[in-house]
Image: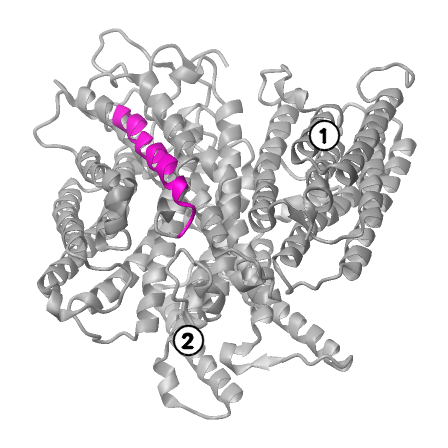
Amino acid sequence: MTHENHPGSLRQGLLVFIFLAFLTLVEFFIAITNQSLLLLSIVALIKGGLVMYYYMHVYKLAEEGSQDQHSDDWKLRTNRLGLWLFILSDSFVFGGLLVSRFNLLGLTRPDLNQYLGLLVTGVLLISSFFMNRAETQMGQGDRKGFVISTTITMLLGIGFLAGVVGVEWREAPFSVGDSAYSAIFFMMTGMHAFHVLTGVIFLGIVLNNGRRGLYTAEKHWGVEAATVYWHFIDLVWILFYPALYLIGRLA
Amino acid sequence: MSKNSSRSLGTVLLFFLGGFVGGTLLAILLHTLTTAKFEVNYLWDLPSLLLGSLAAVVALLHGMLGYRGVVRGLFWQVGGTLAGALFVTLVRWLLNLTGAKYTLFDMNTFGFTEPAWVLGAVVGSVAFVAGVGAITDWFKWALGEKTSEHHEDESGWRKYFGVSLDHKVIGIQYTFTSLLLLSVGGLFALVFRTELAKSGLQFLSLQLYNTLMSLHGIVMIVSILLGIAGVMNYLVPMLIGAQDMAFPRLNAFSFWVAIPAAVLLLSSLALGGFDTGWTGYPPLSVRAPLGMQMFFVAIWFAGWSSILGGLNLIATALRMRTNGMTAFRMPIFVWASFATSIISLTATQLIGLSFQLVLFQRLFGMPFFDAAKGGNPILFQHLFWFYSHPAVYVFVLPGLGLISELLPVFVRKPLFGYKWVAMSSLGIALVGFLVWAHHMFTSGMNEYLRVPFMYSTLLVAVPTGVKFFSWVATLWGGKIDRDIPTPMLFVLGGIVVFLLGGLTGPPNATVSTDLHLTDTYFIVGHFHDTMFGGYIFPFFAALYYWFPKATGKRLNETLGKWHFWLMTPSFLILTLFMMRVGLLGMRRRIGDYDPGLNFDPWHLAMTIAAYGIALAVLIFFINIYRTLRSSETATGNVWRSRSPEWQVPSPMPVHNYEHPFEVVGEPYDYGLPGSIYVKMDAEG
């Protein structure tokens, strides 16, 4: 099964991951060569689209199913709609932060450690790959694989937090109150880190319940919700990373 | 005390008095301890009066209910606030040990330092929601426990003071809270309106005037948000034939998270107030007293109430419709609620963000809006108005939907242009996202932005005009009883008042005239016309109309007419005079004005008119009280409506309809022989 190219297969997951990693390197390359806002935006949007389609399965919203309002299938699709509405709402916060960043900084960027930025981006990307694996494994009834993949995802998430909050915040050549640069940098990374933290907690709950056998291959809405939420956090970083690290000249 | 025994009225009142005395004494004790001097006058000072009132309300509720539901929530909120504040203080003390110097207690900010108060406010609000029991089930889910699908409510009035998952109970909880806040916000207005009756300062300080004026605005806004949430919660599932909302627990959470927000909002009065108006523009809001922070935190939580309520409603309208209810057979009110919810789901995040940025600038010195450090105060206004302009459509769209909903019932004619009216709500909501910067024509933003925003704003008149055209055409040739029923009076009043508000809009939207009108009483008059026409009048119409549905009793018509005929002329005098003095140059948001301008008689008339409105609302409350006490019942189809909820006896049973009904025709075909909207006994 895992060698066919169906949604959630290992091969598809790997392909998506490799493509996303490649595009991240392309972004980095654009940034050190010509810093084109247009090119960087296009690449970021392509990455976002890939995540939304292959990792977050946005097309599932349009799926038809049972009309019986007491059936599990109907409830599942209602829950899915609710989660996506929440994500739509939450994305307005991040949209507002992006707008604020361009309003305040224009086409300049704060002086940040580029290698660290690339490293944490990679960590989050790999975590999304394992998150995708975890969901697939639960869908196939492979509980042991689910536990391992979720644990790796959580560890990578904590690693991301350590990289951003633990290292980047200390290393940054400015402190919170210095300028609009520092303010917007700490606000954007802080808001995102807060969401990563909630995602890790959410994963911890799902992991615990999954280990105790509360989810089955057919019925695991909690796992699906945690997965979509985790990929959403990745999606936000896909837009925040170029906005903070790559776009514009150094201030 | 056993769980369901009732205390006598006298005992409950004793609780109330005891709470008040205890609260004020506690306040003076704290004051004496923190300032090390005893001042008797502090007994009459605002903080001690407010602490006394809070304690009195909690004690009153405790006397009525015992330690559960909202009482437990309030106790937990107080405890949570203290815990959060003490935690920050403790962390600061630990940091002091490392050599950095931090203030632990600050007498200028009522004991705790500002960061301590802010974290206390946040923790307190979360503690309230936990204490009242609105997140218990989610905790159980997280721990892997199963919860029952069916949640049994307590019997009688007690169910309204604790967590219920029934959308009708939640709708009434929302509406009750909304009316409570409406009275509080109205009282604030009466106080400063009395001050304004004469030029010169009578009995308020300028700081207190500013606080009351700001609180009047924001308390009314929260009241309106809760009011529309109440009407939408109560009606939408019923109108579309659902048993409940799509997410009942989320629904309860949305309501209960608004309560600590309201408490925080009012507490800002005791914690120094704030003088920015409800808009909270920096840089003034960066320098304002501690009350500003309470305001920010309160709106942040109230915003979540609105966002999650909107989310729930969208999911409900999309997923829970009964058989045969296609999109274009939905009642107009459902369309309007859907449009409203799109705005509250998305745009609300931006006011939360803008306030959070100011809050962080105050707490951590992050200079988002400090021009000297590269910040930009105009950015705040963009973020703020991106929500706060669409917000006025959140306030009025359900009301305009109610007008379209009720009009055909009373004129016994089909609604004119159903599809156009349905789409116009969405049209207003979507255009509403593109107009925010018309609040900023004089802000110093780029001048070229003024023109596109002027045109997009004027564009709002098109879908609004569609609605007016439909109303007039529906009224045309209709049969109205000579003795107009009270809901219909309020519908007609709403149309007239909203027309006034609408007509005074374009002068503000047009840059050339707005440059003169901005920041004058003309804007205040225009705004109150839109709010009364788009919200207050239709809201009262809905209360009179659906009161029999909720209680099985009909509100008294005579008192209802007194209510209407006292409120409407008073209100028209108030706002028309506001616009008049505004055109003559009266500035808004000021506590005093030059007697040489000769505005004194106009202001006196406005103050008297404001008392007229207050009296009218008081009559409404008396009406509710008397009706609930009377034994006369009205369980049938009081208004001869075609709508499904009136085809079953009132009050509505817990799970609404025994059998799902089927929609077989158009909703508003009144007076057309043989037309049917719903078949009640469809095969389940």
Q: Where is residue B428, by image quadrant?
A: top left
Residue placed most toward the observer, B127 or B172? B127
Q: In terms of secondary structure, where does tag 1 sit?
A: helix
Instruction: Classify the position of the N terminus of chain A by image quarter.
Output: top right
Q: Amino acid at mark 2?
A: Pro
Residue placed most toward the observer, B503 or B417? B503
Which residue occupies 32% across, 25% down?
Answer: B646
User: With B170 as the anchor, is B203 left or right in this view?
Assistant: left
Q: Are marks 1 and 2 on the same chain?
A: no
Residue B348 position in % (x across, y down): 49, 44
Dominant SS in magenta: helix
Residue B387 position in % (x across, y down): 45, 44
Which residue occupies 64% across, 28% down?
Answer: A80
Q: Amino acid at mark 1?
A: Val
Which residue occupies 62% across, 14% down?
Answer: A64
Up-down: is B232 above or below A111?
A: above
State which region is magenta: B444-466
Q: Where is residue B511, by image quadrant?
A: top left
Q: Which residue is mark 1?
A: A43
Q: Which mark is residue B47?
A: 2
Residue B352 position in % (x across, y down): 52, 50
Q: Is residue B190 visible?
A: yes
